[in-house]
Image (cartoon, grey):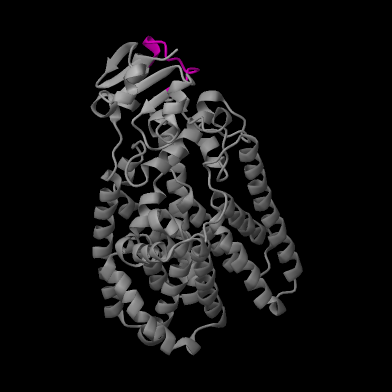
Amino acid sequence: MKSKHIGFFLLFIAIIAISIFYAYPKMLQLLPQGSHLWRQADCMAMTWNYKQFQLPFLQSACYNLQSINGNVAGEFPVFYFLAAKFSDTEFALRLIHTIIFLSGILSVYFISFYFLERTLLSIFCALLIFTSPLLVFYGNNFLSDVPALSFALIGWAIFLSNYKNEKLFWILISFLCFSMAALLKASEAIHFVLLFLFLIRFRSQKSKINLFFVFVLSAWLLVLGWYIYAKHYNKLNHDHYYFLSISPIWKLSLHDIGLAIWRMVVSNSKNYFWRPTSIAILCSIYFLIKHWKKLNEDLHFFMVGSFTLVALYILFFYQKMIGHEYYYIPFFVCFLFLIIGLLKVYNLFHSENIFLHTFLFICLVPNIIFCKNFVEEKCSDNLPNGYYSSVAMQEFLEKNGVTKDKIVISLPDDSPNKTLYQIKRKGYTEFNDYLFLLKNKKADFLLLRMDCFIYAEKFKPYQTDSIGNFNGIVLYKLR
């Protein structure tokens, strides 16, 4: 037990050092940028609406007026609501999500130790997961996907450490973590299913198993209650943007089915790990199958169960796999138990081989370097126009009568909230039918970036009252 705690301390130091190498302190200072800027802006739009309009927790909203007053609900907005209480809102939300993510990585150590009972191999497993560019990028970000996975990992670490001793308090805490995971991202509800199946499979060994089922049911009702409320809230406000349904494989063409496979397996595969590492893991499955009977029954269950549930998740959300690599984040529960299984087989034959142990840790170095470089690439592949976010822009808008209660059409912007979040004004973008809105005078001002739309014929009727130009962004009064 002492070595377990020493291992945790060493892992903690390693994670802090690697986080600094990944430039996490610098990333904490960044506004939304990089991969899926569109989705990042949605998260911050909801956060800033809480802050700017002092909204109640259950009345979440964004800046785009595609719904009534922008009222929308999606994932459980507890951390958006919390971050809105801080002066530096973007920093606060990144920091909250980062702390949760790093806690999830630390939890991997305890999950691994439960099966491996080896300190070094458990540290290796946690560090390997921490070299995934997908997790590292979205772990220090505004999206709730990685925090959701992290809460599930925390839940498993607590549950596996306490269910044999039937420590009800900690079992309850673990179920609350699973609940939070599913509230933050509905796809993480697969952990509830895995937990439920685990309790059924091993129920004969537990005297308090019925009480555990009550915990599961209560936690599930909590999650279900939120999503029922969110769907009702969106319907009430005529929202047609937030996705609270499935996009299954059977609704897609053969071309799209093949495209999703290509994206998951080939073109987006470097998001998982350094590709040589991914190939090595795949090749090692041969040894896992060969020595399958030598592994523990509960490890069999978690490997097979997690693989099956992830496969079902892919089938039900297949269309999302084409253009949204952050939908791959739930795969990591399967990856984790697969890696643990491979390390268990390795430990059967090389438990005392210090040279191979050393080699494993040396192999982490190129993975860490690759992760750092790819995360930097993901951070810079979509940069917003900084003028919109500047203090000078706020002064320009206020000076020209665009107060916080005015409605703005901001063009060009193909997303619902990117530029509206930057200027902190309600309104519309290219995401909406802006020509209809202009024609029917549904907005007070038009904000038009000169290098894109200023000479378009379709905008000439609305360019008669120019009242200001801020670094190539022209402001027109509409009514």
Residue 297 drawn above or below residue 425: below
Is residue 398 highlighted in magenta? yes
Q: How many marks?
A: 0
Is residue 304 highlighted in magenta? no
For the point 53% across and 47% down, which residue is it?
243
| Residue 386 in view of the camera | yes
Between 167 and 365, which is closer to the camera in this rendering? 365
Residue 208 drawn above or below residue 388: below
- Left or right: 177 as drawn, with respect to 206: left
Residue 439 drawn above or below residue 47: above
For the point 40% across and 78% down, which residue is it?
342
- Give the image quarter of residue 289: bottom left
Picture coordinates of residue 255 (x, y %)?
Answer: 38, 64
Picture coordinates of residue 105 (x, y %)?
Answer: 43, 59
- Left or right: 340 as drawn, with respect to 21: right
Between 385 and 479, which is closer to the camera in this rendering? 479
Between 353 and 309, which is closer to the camera in this rendering? 309
For the point 49% across and 84% down, which residue is it?
295
| Residue 164 in view of the camera | no
**Start and end of the magenta stretch?**
397-408
Picture coordinates of residue 36 (x, y %)?
Answer: 37, 46
- Give the image quarter of residue 433: top left
For the point 41% across and 17% down, which residue is it?
445
Q: Quadrant of the C terminus?
A: top left
Residue 465 drawn above or below residue 474: above
Picture coordinates of residue 167 (x, y %)?
Answer: 67, 64
Most common SS among magenta residues:
loop
Between 45 and 204, which is closer to the camera in this rendering? 45
